[in-house]
Image: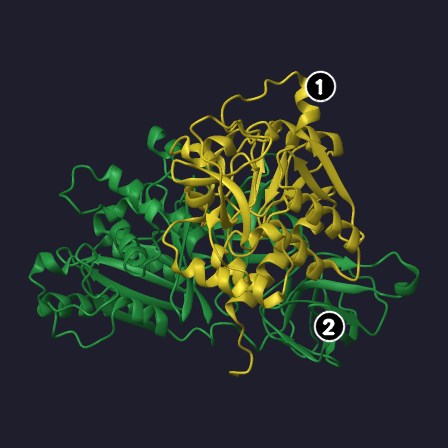
Chain colours: A green, B yellow
Amino acid sequence: MDLLRFITAGSVDDGKSTLIGRLLYDSKSILTDHLEAIEKQSKNKKEGEIDLALLTDGLRAEREQGITIDVAYKYFSTPKRKFIIADAPGHIQYTRNMVTGASNSELAIILVDARNGVVEQTRRHSIIVSLLNIPHVIVAINKMDLVQYSEDVFNNIVIDYAAVAGSLGLNDVQYIPISALNGDNIVDKSDSMGWYKGSSLLELLEQVEIRHDINHTDARFPVQFVIRPQVEELHDYRGYAGKIISGVYRTGDAVTLHPSGQESRISRIERDGKDTEEAWAPQSVVLHLEDDIDISRGDMIVHTANRPQLAQELDVLLCWMDAKPLKRGNRYLFQINSRHVKAVVKNIEYKLNVNTLEKDPDVDSVNLNDIVKATIKTASPVSYDPYKKLRANGGAILIDETSYVTVGACMISEPLS
Amino acid sequence: MDEYTIDYLDQLESEAIHIMREVAGQFERPALLFSGGKDSITLVHLALKAFRPGKLPFPLVHIDTGHNFPEALQFRDKLASDLNERLVVRKVEDTIRTKGLTEPKGKFASRNALQTFTLLDTIEEFRFDACIGGARRDEEKARAKERIFSVRDEFGQWDPKLQRPELWNTYNGKIHNGENVRAFPISNWTELDVWNYIRREKIGLPSIYFAHNRAVIEHQGQLVAVSDFIQLDESDVVQNRNVRYRTVGDMTCTAAVESDAATIDDIITEIIATRTSERGETRIDDRVSEAAMEDRKKGGYF
């Protein structure tokens, strides 16, 4: 059994909450006491009907203040797979919310209203999916019941969306006609759409091939913590604790410490307190090196033959997440995996229109939900890989130095020439 | 490269270890909040995997309401002593006395709300800047929306609308003096994941998780253990039933479930078959209001 994290992109009007509710309900993940609570709230419905959208209903603070918390997480599983849904609400703060939810997702369900087809919002969601490099996309064409389950309507939307996917470089896209409200093609195949020969949505989610999504080529190990037991019998023990974010490590591997550049070999790998010859992403392990070199949290152990970029000036796509605007020259803390460095936003080149991908050179004010191309200069060198190549070592956050709030998400681009 | 696969429990385990090491790496004085329940016992097991052969970089902290199951307390003391790790116990009883707090009244007078006072005092006493807890997002909808690193102000309060965006596996632990972070390494685990992990890792649990005979009364469909901490009325019928506990909290606010499950396998079979949520079936305190957990979190609760 493996684990798939996915995000659902769409607004309330597209039936997103109903879809999530339906997946949870039909996969029998809703327990009776939660269901009873919803039934009480679904008073206006006919006897025996419940409003599935209420399953994703928010906190009292959200209802009272008319706000939405950026992401809620829902869980369900089938005998084949455990699923984690990142449910990002589709209101004003949408870009920020979706970027947050998308950052950990391996798959996105993009909801399209069959009556409206591919609209501006569909493009926006797809652009964010491509910027965040989510490997798999399912386009769920919803409300098929309102277009008489028409195959033509479905086919036309597929043609329109294929053009969008092509222009964005989305490679793995699957299409499915559904009615979340009636449960058509969600868990079971629909009787109303005999022309659709593909799998149900749940089957698609179970079948998506995800084991190749983790990179096992580029070995990256950010050191989180140094284990040094202060006891006599383990006097010489010095283990580097961390999670392998990508790649494979074996004992004897020639490694280099970033950013210092010192070289050594792996003398020992411990996982779960036992020695092992080989370990791979995303395992948490303890590495030991042959040489006694000075290593601390924030350093990265990589293969000498395959090193990440090392730079102090980074070209990034930056999603701004704070109400206080971003200004050129502002200073922040830059956090990538376990490393923190001071940084300054040196230059802002353009603002990206997330509906059209047009580049807007007017960058006088960069506000919440804006995505900009910027150059960041860090106080000391940072090891990274381009985000498009290696998500696990290409994403970083910016932290306000005074409020300590996370104000930006950086997707690091190819190195500056 | 099909050989490099990883099972979902391994993924959850690795994520939890990563989060614990981030806490140890980013904070000066962390603590692990230990209740004696299965989730916090699982946390201790994960902490050993994260930091052995070193000592844990934090003490185990138990906020003792005085209404605990004796089996859970014995388990707590034995675990800490077997592991040779530091255990800090602070009693709600003492807070009630020194602060002149009012004891709750009623049939199931629960100190659940009062433990927030003791927790905040303990955080202040030791100047803990991060507290690791065993909350899971599948438990309750307020928890579904809380971050893995959840920043609390000096009153311990959670503000759902001022949460920091949490991206990738990058956890922002920067805080001001007086603030603290509650860190939840098993946020993404469900109840069943925890039980499957306990089975796989052969983690020991207090005996009350397994079926045993106990004197209980039935109250609004829930079975409550007879103890010194609850008031018996004339209408109560004390009966001996075969029960087990699905969660372990105070004797006043945790209900038992009728069960003959004697092994972990039996328990897992029961949980798969059950149609009621963990908190719904066993927590008397959550029934007070629909937003009970949200309110308690805002007030500084775990």
The answer to whether A289 appears left or right of A162 in the picture is: right
Q: CA distance from mark 1 to mark 2?
A: 48 Å
Name the outermost residue toward the top.
B100
Whether residue B271 is visible: yes
Q: Does residue A169 show up?
A: no
Q: Position of residue A206 (x, y in %)?
A: 36, 71
Number of the label disc, if any, that sits on residue B195: none
Image quarter of residue A7: bottom left
Do the residues marked 1 and 2 share a common chain?
no
Q: Where is mark 1, residue-wise?
A: B98
What chain does badge 2 belong to?
A
Helix or strand or loop: what does disc 1 sit on? Answer: helix
From the viewer's perspective, is residue A4 above or below residue B26? Answer: below
B302 versus B92 height, above or below? below
Instruction: Tell me the SS state at disc 2.
Output: strand
Residue at the left extreme of this rendering? A148
Q: Quadrant of the C terminus of chain A?
A: bottom right
Chain containing mark 1: B
Amino acid, disc 1: Thr
Position of residue B77 relative to residue B46, above or below, is: above
- Label 1–label 2 contact, CB within 8 A: no
Give amino acid for label 2. Answer: Lys
Q: Position of residue A220 (x, y in %)?
A: 63, 69
Residue bearing the label numbered 2: A274
